C-alpha cells in the first residue's frame, strides 16, 4: 500500500503529518512523494484563515474529481472545527482528527477496504517519542504541548486543539537527543503557544529550553510562538535561556493590535504596555534578537484611532518580521457575530501597514550589509543555491556550500525579506 500526505498550515500540523507517516511506515506502508503513485491520499488540513479554508475545500473536491480511483482521508483542524462543511465537500471521505493519530493505520486499512472511517474527538495521547518520518532530514520538529490557555475571540484553532496538555521535559529532551544523533542540525520546539508549556504540569519553558540547548552536538533550537500573557513570571529565566549559544536569537511574539481597547475586546489578556516591557527586556539583554509578531488588520471593533495606534506601535518597536492578516470570520469564533468593517477600509489599512512593514525590515536588513555572520545551512533553495540561517534566524541565500554545515558568510546583498551571502 502507498500513501501520499499533503500538509497545510503550521509547523505543528507538519509534525502531525510526520507522526502519521512514521506510524504508517512502521506498519509496512510506503509513504510516497508523488500523488500519482499513491493508493491513498491524506490531506492534513489547516483552518485558521478563510483563504486557507477555501483552498482546502477546493482541493478536497479536486482530488475526488481528478483521482476517482484513489481513497481520500482528511485530517487536521477542519475535522474538529467544521465537520458539516467537510461532509458536504467530501461525503465519502474518511476522517482522522488531530488527537487521534495513533488510529491512522486502522483508518487507512478501513478506507482501503471501502469503508468510510471517521475518528475524531479529544485525547491526551502524547506526541513525543512516537514514530516520526521527517519531511526534512536536517530539521526535527517536536511538539512540546498541545492546546492553549487562551480564549481569543477570533480564533477557531483552539476549538480543534482543545485545552492545554504539556508533555514531560524528560521525553522532549530524549527525542531531541535522538534527532541530533541522527544528524539533525535544527530542532524546532512548537506548540499553539510555547509559553503556556508546563502551566498544567508544573514545569517551565525556560527549563525545557536550557535542557535541550545543553545537549551535546552541533545544532540550533528554534522556539515557536509565545503568547505574551503566559510569559509573566518566567520572563527573566527565558531571557537567560535565549542567551545560550545553541538557541536561535528569535522570538515569535504576536501582539495582534496596538490598541488596548481592541486587545481587551479580542480577549488577549495583556496590554500594549505589558507587551512592550517584554520586548524591551529581551532587547536590553539580547540586542541582536529577531522579533516576529502577528497583526490582525480590521478587527470588527477597530476604529481609525485604534488602527493608527497599531501603526504607531509598529514604527516604535520596529519588528524584524511581521505577519499581517486581514480579519475574517471563522467558524465557531465568537467575534464572527460582529459586523465586518467595510472591505475598502480593510484594504487601505492593510496596505498602509504593509508599506511600513517592508520599509522597516528593509532598513533593518541593510544594517547587516558587509558583515560576516555565522550561519547553519538548513535547506535547498527553491530558486537555486541553499538557505542558511543566522544566529538571529535571518535567512541567507548562499551558493557552493554543504547542506547541514556550520559556516561563516559575508553578506553581499540585502532585500526586505532575506540576505544574500558568500562563504568565507
Image: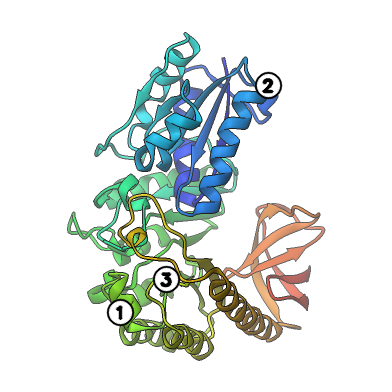
Marks 2, 3: nearer the viewer: 3
Residue 114, position as x, y percentages in the image: 47, 10
Identify the residue position indicated by label 3 in the image. Answer: 299
The disc label shown at residue 388, or none = none
Q: In what element is the residue under mark 1?
A: helix
| Quarter of the figure that contains the C terminus | bottom right
Return the disc, 1 or 2, that comes first in the chain's sequence. 2
Q: Is residue 164 above or below residue 406?
A: above
Left or right: residue 154 versus residue 408 is: left
| Viewer-nearest residue: 191 or 244 | 191
Q: Which residue is mark 1?
A: 236
> Within 10 angstroms of label 2, few (less than 14), some, or many (20 or more) residues?
some
Crowding around mark 3 (Cα neighbors within 10 Å: few <14, some 14 to 19, many 20+) is: many
One can see residue 180 in this view: no
Q: For residue 363, what is the image quadrant?
A: bottom right
Q: Are marks 1 and 3 in contact (CB under 8 Å)?
A: no
Q: Which is more foreground, mark 1 or mark 3? A: 3
Is the C-beta separation of discs 2 and 3 under 8 Å? no
> In what element is the residue under mark 2?
helix
Whether residue 302 appears in this view of the structure is yes
Using the image as rendered, state which of residue 412 and residue 314 is in the foreground: 314
Q: Residue drawn at (54%, 49%), measured in percent from left and top?
A: 52
Q: Nearer the viewer, residue 125 or 215?
A: 125
Residue occupying the far top of the picture: 113
Q: Nearer the viewer, residue 177 or 81?
A: 81
Q: Is residue 335 above or below residue 26?
A: below
Question: Which is closer to the viewer, label 1 or label 2?
Answer: 2
Residue 101 percent coordinates (x, y): 38, 31
Residue indicated by mark 2:
37
Amino acid at each position: 500500500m502507498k500513501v501520499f500526505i499533503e500538509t497545510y498550515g503550521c509547523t505543528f500540523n507538519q509534525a502531525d503529518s510526520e507522526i502519521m507517516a512514521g506510524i504508517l511506515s512502521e506498519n509496512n506502508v510506503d509513504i510516497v512523494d508523488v500523488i500519482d503513485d499513491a493508493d491513498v491520499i491524506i490531506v492534513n488540513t489547516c483552518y485558521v484563515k478563510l483563504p486557507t479554508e477555501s483552498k482546502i475545500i477546493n482541493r478536497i473536491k479536486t482530488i475526488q474529481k481528478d483521482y476517482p480511483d484513489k481513497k481520500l482521508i482528511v485530517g487536521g483542524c477542519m475535522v474538529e472545527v467544521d465537520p458539516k462543511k467537510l461532509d458536504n465537500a467530501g461525503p465519502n471521505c474518511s476522517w482522522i482528527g488531530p488527537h487521534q493519530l495513533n488510529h491512522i493505520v486502522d483508518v487507512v486499512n478501513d478506507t482501503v477496504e471501502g469503508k468510510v472511517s471517521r475518528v475524531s474527538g479529544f485525547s491526551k495521547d502524547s506526541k513525543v517519542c512516537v514514530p516520526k518520518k521527517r519531511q526534512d532530514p536536517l530539521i526535527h520538529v517536536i511538539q512540546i504541548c498541545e492546546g492553549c490557555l487562551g480564549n481569543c475571540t477570533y480564533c477557531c484553532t483552539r476549538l480543534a486543539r482543545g485545552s492545554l496538555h504539556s508533555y514531560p521535559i524528560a521525553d522532549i529532551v530524549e527525542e531531541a537527543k535522538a534527532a541530533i544523533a541522527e544528524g539533525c542540525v535544527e530542532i524546532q520546539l512548537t506548540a499553539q503557544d510555547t509559553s503556556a508549556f508546563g502551566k498544567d504540569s508544573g514545569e517551565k519553558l525556560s527549563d525545557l529550553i536550557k535542557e535541550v540547548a545543553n545537549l551535546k552536538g552541533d545544532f540550533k533550537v528554534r522556539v515557536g510562538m509565545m503568547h505574551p500573557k503566559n510569559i509573566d513570571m518566567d520572563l527573566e529565566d527565558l531571557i537567560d535561556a535565549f542567551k545560550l549559544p545553541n538557541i536561535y536569537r528569535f522570538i515569535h511574539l504576536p501582539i495582534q493590535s496596538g490598541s488596548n481597547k481592541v486587545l481587551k475586546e479580542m480577549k488577549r489578556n495583556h496590554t500594549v504596555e505589558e507587551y512592550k516591557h517584554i520586548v524591551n527586556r529581551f532587547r536590553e539583554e539580547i540586542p541582536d534578537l529577531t522579533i516576529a509578531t502577528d497583526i490582525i488588520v480590521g478587527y470588527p471593533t477597530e476604529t481609525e484611532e485604534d488602527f493608527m495606534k497599531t501603526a504607531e506601535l509598529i514604527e516604535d518597536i520596529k519588528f524584524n518580521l511581521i505577519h499581517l492578516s486581514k480579519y475574517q470570520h471563522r467558524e465557531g469564533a465568537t467575534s464572527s457575530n460582529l459586523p465586518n468593517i467595510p472591505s475598502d477600509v480593510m484594504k487601505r489599512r492593510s496596505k498602509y501597514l504593509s508599506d511600513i512593514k517592508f520599509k522597516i525590515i528593509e532598513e533593518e536588513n541593510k544594517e547587516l550589509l558587509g558583515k560576516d555572520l555565522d550561519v547553519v545551512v538548513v535547506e535547498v533553495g527553491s530558486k537555486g543555491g541553499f538557505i542558511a540561517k543566522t544566529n538571529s534566524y535571518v535567512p541567507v541565500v548562499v551558493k557552493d556550500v554543504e547542506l547541514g554545515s556550520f559556516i561563516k558568510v559575508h553578506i553581499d546583498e540585502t532585500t526586505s525579506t532575506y540576505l544574500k551571502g558568500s562563504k568565507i
